[in-house]
Amino acid sequence: MSGFAWAFGRDLRLAWRHPGETLMVVAFFVLVASLFPLGVGAEPQTLRRIGSGVIWVCALLAAFLSLSSLFAADYADGSLEQMTLSPHPMVGWATGKIAAHWAATGLPLTILSPLLAMQYGLDAATLGTLAFGLALGTPLLSLLGAACSALTLGARGGGVLLALLALPLFVPVLIFGAGAADAQASGLSPSPHLSLLGAGLIVGAMGLPPAVCAALRIALD
Amino acid sequence: MNWFYFSSPSTFYRFAGRIAPWFYALAALLAGAGLYVGLVVAPTDAQQGEVYRVIFIHVPAAWMSMFLYFVMACYAGLSLTFNTRLSAMMARAIAPTGAMFTFMALWTGAFWGRPTWGTYWAWDARMVSELVLFFLYVGFIALANAFEDPRRGDRAASLLALIGVVNLPIIYFSVQWWNTLHQGSSVRFTGSTMHIAMLQGMLLMAFACWMYAIGATLTRVRSVILERERRTRWVREL
Amino acid sequence: MSALEIRSLACSRGDSRLFRDVSFTLPPGEWIAVRGPNGSGKTTLLRCVAGLTRPDAGIVIWGGKPTSEAGTQFRSAMLYAGHAPGIKDELTAAENLRNALALRGAAPSDEALRESLGSVGLAKIRNLAARRLSAGQRRRIGMARLALDAAALWILDEPLTALDADGESMFAGLLERHLRRGGSALIATHHAIGSLQAKEVRLAS
């Protein structure tokens, strides 16, 4: 069994036994996205214009919420040490954990996004672009977030420090993801945005896990 | 020259103490010359009047903020690769100066923006990237100080600096893609090429800021060294 | 069977220098007790040998090769158990054991798992979520892992913590069997373990 499969299976089972995390992320997403019309006014034209951006920001914040627990539990109960000392290469199980994290947070957000898009009155094509963009972007957010989470393991300042580190790194994902949906809504092609997101995901999937491993080693030192 | 001679904190402490004043003096001289050129010699701009003169601080500050981040990331890389204490201390010493220049660039940019484009803040590539850079600096400083063990703070912040230096161009290009108000490339803002005096003024001020940054970093690294090495004999003898 | 060799190991935590110039050899079939007062660096020494903490100086050699070069080989042959046992609350004892062994590349049958948990006295509660187990019972899951794992070198930090007299003698039996098979162990403890003789490495404070 590879390190990736081991970590992915284990973390998914843990998330299944303890679904509080997933439910909280999803609830936050829906709640905040529903707050915006209350604050901005429910005029259909306004909502249609701000819809994709708002949904993206909410997805970003919801994904961010679950980041601090990515490595914290394993760090506290000694599992992280055992994983680091296993014969499996570190990159394998670290990527497995990140993938499981995405499956338990980013994926539900992506699946729910069409419902919220309908709340904002977005048309079918925009809705599709939004969901596809989220499907590409949320794994990248998990990867970027994992690096920040690993860096701040056991640090003072907790969530705020993590926000300070992670949110600036999230900016390009937000720009291209929301940009794709907006382009679709104005009749332009979203493919340049989506291809850049896709490219970012590939580069991130290759380059970020080693950075996460380096950060974890620093935390265990 | 044996570079590793200087990588010992005690020797570097004395060395930095001796040369820092020279950099401050150089900075003052260059700033004097730069401000003279900028405020007196350079002509009034056809479209923007006298207000444009704020670029003599704004542009050098912006250049410095990005340059210093790059230098900081280099020291961060050195400290992670060779595990030297002094490289990590230098990175820590640069960060506050870099943050200061970023802050100055943002404020002078807003000050310039109001009369020129009617708005204090514009969502264009450069301003947003500059703002993100400010958060990267603050994040670095916060992370470095977030741990009991300063060495752990050093390493975590160094890794963060490296991640940031890769991300900064990405953020810049992504925001530029998204929107741009600023004129395309560097020092063109009247649509035509700049008056030579304006360019001279900005370059002089840029060098002044650079010299100041070196002086400030050297001074700051001395206090970082003192604090880190406070248990060693040579510090107690001071 | 490989031998562990430590040469001139030095490490500091924060500002204080914990130990320096620690050298010893651990041949197969023997075990070394690391002793010293609280705060003298026993845990740090074990972590340096295992590879979790980077030492200031010195080198760890396993089977003739430095562990910095032959890392994977060393980690397959070595089993580390620190203060925190690496047990997930939400999983059962059996699942925790299976996971821990799979992480090290072993895939024992359900039979073997059940038998092993039975031998450490956890047969009846093996399907209980670990959060419901006492500290001593969690330690016993660790002992079941030691029994089933094929590692040649054990690096254990205070393994007798939270164990009752029964558990202590169980552990002594496990260690004896391990040493007889040619394994070796580096153990930080201030107890005697059964009647087994050991070399000592003492860390001053």
Image (cartoon, helix red, strand yellow):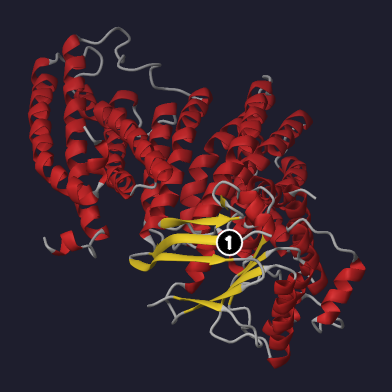
Front one among A58 and C167: C167
On screen, residue B169 above or below C11: above
Is residue B87 toward the left or the right of residue A93 in the image?
Answer: left
Vertical placement of residue C119 versus C64, above or below? below
| Quadrant of residue C75 within the rendered picture | bottom right
Residue A46 appears anywhere in the view: no
> Helix, strand, or loop for circle 1?
strand
Determine the residue located farthest toward the top in the rendered image: B192
Query: In the image, what residue occupies the spot 55% across and 55% down?
Result: C61
Left or right: B78 as drawn, with respect to B236: right
Q: Position of residue A82 (x, y in %)?
A: 65, 62
Looking at the image, residue B222 sits to the left or right of residue C67; the answer is left
Viewer-proximal residue among C156 and C182 = C182
Residue C149 visible in image: yes
Name the one closer to the observer, B147 or B83: B83
Mark 1 packing: few (<14 Cα in 10 Å), some, or many (20+)? many
Q: Which residue is mark 1?
A: C4
Q: Kindly identify the amino acid type of the residue bearing the numbered disc 1.
A: Leu
Q: Is residue B236 left or right of residue C191?
A: left
How far from the left and from the top, in percent, is residue C157?
58, 74
Residue at the spot x=88%, y=74% of the render?
C114
The residue that appears at 44% across and 63% down in the rendered structure is A156
